Amino acid sequence: MDYQISREVFFNLGGPHGVPRLIVYAIALLVMAAFIYFLVKKIKVWRLGQPEKRTDKIVTRLWGIVEFVFLQIRILKEKLPGITHLFLFWGFGVLFVGTALIVIQEDFTLLLFDARFWYGAFYKWYSLALDLAGLFALIAVIVFAVIRYIVKPERLDNKPTDAISLILIFLILISGFINEGLRMAATEVSTNPKVAAMSEVLAGAGDEFLREMPELTDEQLISKANENPAFTDTPITEENVYLVRNGYYYDNNLAMWSPVGLTLARAFNSTMSEGGILTFHKINWWIHLLLAMTFVVYLMLGKLMHIITSSLNVFFRKLEPKGALKPIEDMENAESYGVAYSEQFTWKLLMDGDACTHCGRCQDNCPAWLSDKPLSPKKIVNDTNDNLYERAPQLFKKVASEEIESKALIGEANELDAVWSCTTCLACVENCPVMIDQVQKINEMRRYKVLMEGEMSKELTAAMQNMEKNSNPYGFGFHERGNWAEGLPIKTLAEDPDVEYLYYVGCAGSFDDRYKKVATAFVKIMAQAGVKVGMLGQEEGCCGDSARRAGNEYLFATLAQTNIETFKSYNVKKIVTTCPHGYNCLKNEYPQLEGGKFEVYHFTELVLDLIKKGRIKLNKSVDGIKEVAYHDSCFLGRYNDLYNQPREIIKSIPGTKVVEFTRNKSKSYCCGAGGARMWMEETIGKRINHVRTQDAIDKEYKTIGTACPFCLTMLSDGIKELGKEESMQTIDILEMVMKSMDIK
Amino acid sequence: MNSAVILKQVPDTEALIKVKPDGTGIVKEGVKFVINPYDEFGVEEALKKKEAAGSGEVTIVSIGPDRSVESIRTALAMGADKGVLLKIGEDEYSDALATAKALAEELKGKDYKIIFCGKQAIDDDMAQIGPMVAELMGLPCVTVVTKVDVSGDKAVCSREIEGGKEIVEVALPAVISCQKGLNEPRYASLPGIMKAKKKPLDIKDTKLDAPKATIDKWENPPQRAAGRIIEGDDAAAKAAALVKALRQEAKVI
């Protein structure tokens, strides 16, 4: 057994049996107690929130920890900060695990079973791994400091805790390396000739002695060592017992496995005396220990808290379809709806606030923020969190919510215009590395405004009244719903219920003149492809997406339930939609209601499948269009991961290629119409549709391809309003498919 | 401040109205019924006045068939306190005077400081109920009102008149008929909707007096003739053809 390749714990600090070890344990216990105290305090604050079940599907939840914490998949979506964070996470992680391994050996396997594993080849690789880990972590800290304090991107707000955290980690790493360098200077690469000589003497000592030695106290070591004739002339005493130990670990080859430590050790040896090195080592060792202990306590107090809270947040993340908002339970008997006081959020939405790392990626991708609206998803999360902590002390005293003096959640902590600026595009949610649900938060506040106070913009009120009276936000009479399909090869289920798919047309397909053409194209394509679809005509109702996203859960439930009853009355199994809002609503949200489970497809799925099967034949190019800039609909892409289907369809058209916006797929920029914004005036900042249209203008794209009625309207308006009608156009994928099939 | 609102349920403005083949009425199947929009202004104003006074009750009074309950509940959801439906049969009809008499009978002796109603119902456009009820109850009536300021036993109302505004001071109690512009009717809150289900709604079977004015027949408006595209070799020829058609066929120039 190669016990010699290892080292002694608590070297220069009384060895494994010295008093310092006990002091360290005492400090560690205090620190653990403090950590637990602060954690419990946090948990109590979170539990001020409302109940929500987030403990189902444990395996999936744990796998999330692997994906999003250990593999940092979400964090890596941004390259430089992502890789830097990976370095720091794994660097610090390896250092933590390395330290923990020593604790496991010393306080568990060795104590209970006399078993060591921290020696030999393992020790060598361990040394190298920790050395490199420290180095990577150190580089990461420096890069972070440069990003934060020199580059200063808008999305980062520098608070004292950011600096404290970086400095703390920096000092821990530096003091750790200094420690290693000093230890190695006194042991592995000692310049004391006596140490080298002692090493040779020890090389001849018996195996048994070598094996036992690391565990001997100074006294035992002195008497044992002196038994050896080699020490007769210069007996080992209290003063020079370290010579035995150093001689034992004197090993230039081993030092190669700790390159950073070796470099530092050589520097120390060339500038300091042996006595100085040992004294400095003692002092620095305590400094390093205290810094590390401070780190553990600080874990629950500032920025570093995210190590704990973000991991918890990942574990407790939403596992329901990401496109589905959470329903209000038992609307009939609930006393209040939505959230007006921060403690009315569920505990998980409150935990979000402490999980936020302030990285600002949500803000960077928010169409409202990027068009100069008062909404930043990051601000929503953090201002809500501040509001919670402002209220928490009084909540613990059981003061009633209404009587607590604090900033009002809506209107003061969060601007009302911020709440209404959200397009529910999900860019914040999809780009958040720690699975915060900003959109649900915003929706809860909208629910309060709409359901409790009936307060919303005039235009939105009108849209909701239209949905109530005529089941469409446009305000057309409901009896006109099926008129667009007159003369087309499609029947209502009342006329012929024997169909493969119900085509859920939606309000835009039924009433919007431009989008009626797309609905018409769909019907003709299906007829040509020999797929039998039927529609509901006058019996169809609004899907309720806009109502729900505007916060009117009651109206949504009413509309949805009416549709579900109609679907069931015709025994509908498979539904296809052209509008992504209807698609998301029917597919992900109707199942929350009784009897609301149907097979729901978006036309992009169905059409691509038919192209692959050869039932749709794309014969010719369309109006000379050579390239199409495909604009991702939020409700297809981020909501339902349908990124490739629309692109595949466009590519299947002869002579047509897909070109990309700079912001595309999960980072695509909303058209501005989601979240019921379609029905509201946009009076603050730039127009979101102009920003998006400008993206295409900057790239000199001529044709914008869409697969959503709202996107089509918004971008067509954008082109008109920016005076590009002559040179640019929008086209729905279905229109392209129809023309390519040569259908008139 | 107690007030009452006379409310009529009418077909939605977007509803497709078809006259029955025999001309005795409209086809009601598939028609969505709503609160007469002008009456809705009345509901909102009554609620505003009650809120400003800090006390009082708003009573909704309607004449109509069973389905009118839905509209009364909507007004209760907005915040009105109780409702009365003077119930008549689905196709029962009488004239405005008989209707006003029944309403006046119900409203009499109830300490309403203001009785609000719409300036007219959007279905039959009679615009008679407000003034008739006032007359029958011996109350003053201000019609087509866009602003109401109550102070003590008086109200100062603004009315829209041709080319301007008329400011009228009226002693209360009075009947006030409401015009668009008076207010923005509120959107009922969900607790309001839930509470409305439990608010008192008195349904009284009602027999209207025989009408003195009867409707002989209902007719659809004449079908609009199809448009015509003027053909011609060039713009000048088309213009000439258009002028000729306007002068000789349409006889408008």
Image (cartoon, grey):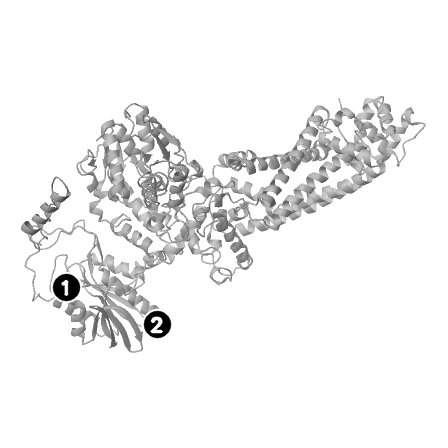
Q: In percent of the image, x 83 and y 25: which residue is there?
A: A209
Disc 2 is placed on an element classified as helix
- Residue B228: quadrant of the picture: top left
Q: Does A649 appear above or below B164? A: above
Q: In percent of the image, x 81 and y 29: which residue is there?
A: A213
Mark 1 = which residue?
B126
Q: Residues within 10 Å of mark 2 (few under 14, many from 20)?
A: few
- B213 vs A69, left or right, is left
x and y percent of residue A364 in the render? 48, 44
Task: Report how far apart the C-alphas of labels 2 and 1 lie in the structure.
Answer: 33 Å
Precedes in sequence: disc 2 or disc 1:
2
Three-letter code for the amino acid on which mark 2 is drawn: Ala
Q: Quadrant of the N terminus of chain A?
A: top right
Residue A595 visible in this rendered orientation of the protein: no
x and y percent of residue A64 in the render? 51, 36
Q: Does A388 appear above or below A670? A: below
Mark 2 = which residue?
B53
